[in-house]
Amino acid sequence: MRAIFILLLAANLVFFGYQYLFVAKNEAAPDAKVKTEVSAGGGLQLLAEQEDVSKLQARVRSEVKMESPAASSEKPDAEFCTMIGPYGQLLQAEYAVERLVALGAVAHITPVEIKEGESYWVYLKPEVSEKEALRRLYELQKKNIESHVITKGELTNGISFGRFADYAEAEARSAEIKKQGYEVDIKMLPKMIQETWVVIDAGFAEKIDESVWADLLTKESTLEKRQNFCLGVASQ
């Protein structure tokens, strides 16, 4: 009877020891694995939180792009000069400069080329040399055809029969020359005129009283006051 009791007691001890040492250890292992994975991954993150982070990153990138110096093509240092003109008389322009300089402004006279329509040039194509061009000119003058040798530009050593403001006049002149047996061409050219302007450097016009501007502008009926970029004024 004692032997059976001892055997049952030993069996219970073995059973409880097995439960404690092996089963409990195996159940704890998955929890440890989960904790390890959570630590390695930097923590769990909900899908909604991921979307919010993505939207924030996109917004930051957009703001950075907008604030980047993409406007470098603009000219932040460009300044505007004040101009008075066009002057028909150079003396009046010189008077205006003297008066403005006396008031502390930096002013100067600038010629400005302005396109004013087109002109039409009737001509013969250039000869191979100046000698040939002179021979052709002599030939034309013997026929009483008014002409002259072109001495510069892309038509050097060609023969000119005149420039005309109206295309119909150029065509009529061309027809006359063609009747004499010459193949002439008509070239359209921009008609440029040169105007005289007084230019006041940036920062000085504001210091001049309005009464002075009014007086300067009454010297000639065609005068006006305008602003333009200080650089490249002459190439307007």
Image (cartoon, rainbow, N blue to C red):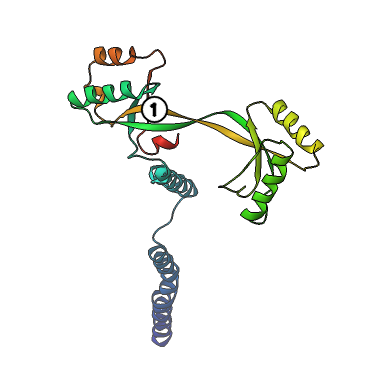
Give how far across and how far down residue 184 sits, in percent: 74, 41
The quadrant in which residue 173 appears is top right
Question: Residue drawn at (39%, 65%), measured in percent from left and top?
Answer: 35
Q: Is residue 90 left or right of residue 61?
A: left
Image quadrant of residue 32?
A: bottom left
The type of residue carrying mark 1 is Thr
Specify whether residue 63 is in view: no
> 167 or 80: which is nearer to us?
167
Outermost residue to the bottom: 3
Mark 1, secondary structure of its residue:
strand
Q: How many marks?
A: 1
Q: Quadrant of the C terminus?
A: top left
Q: Quadrant of the N terminus?
A: bottom left
Q: What x and y, as percent, mark residue 209? A: 22, 16
Q: Residue furthest front?
A: 142
Q: Is residue 5 visible?
A: yes
Task: Judge whether 109 appears above or below 14 on screen.
Answer: above
Residue under the image location 60 percent in, 48 percent down: 154
Picture layout, residue 43 above or below residue 28: above
User: Does 199 sit left or right of 138 as displayed?
Assistant: left
Relative to residue 135, is residue 94 drawn left or right?
left
Mark 1, residues whose alpha carbon is within 10 Å: few (<14), some, or many (≥20)?
some
Q: Position of residue 74 (x, y in %)?
A: 41, 40
Reply above or below: 44 against 225.
below
141 or 51, which lies in front? 141
Q: Which residue is mark 1?
A: 196
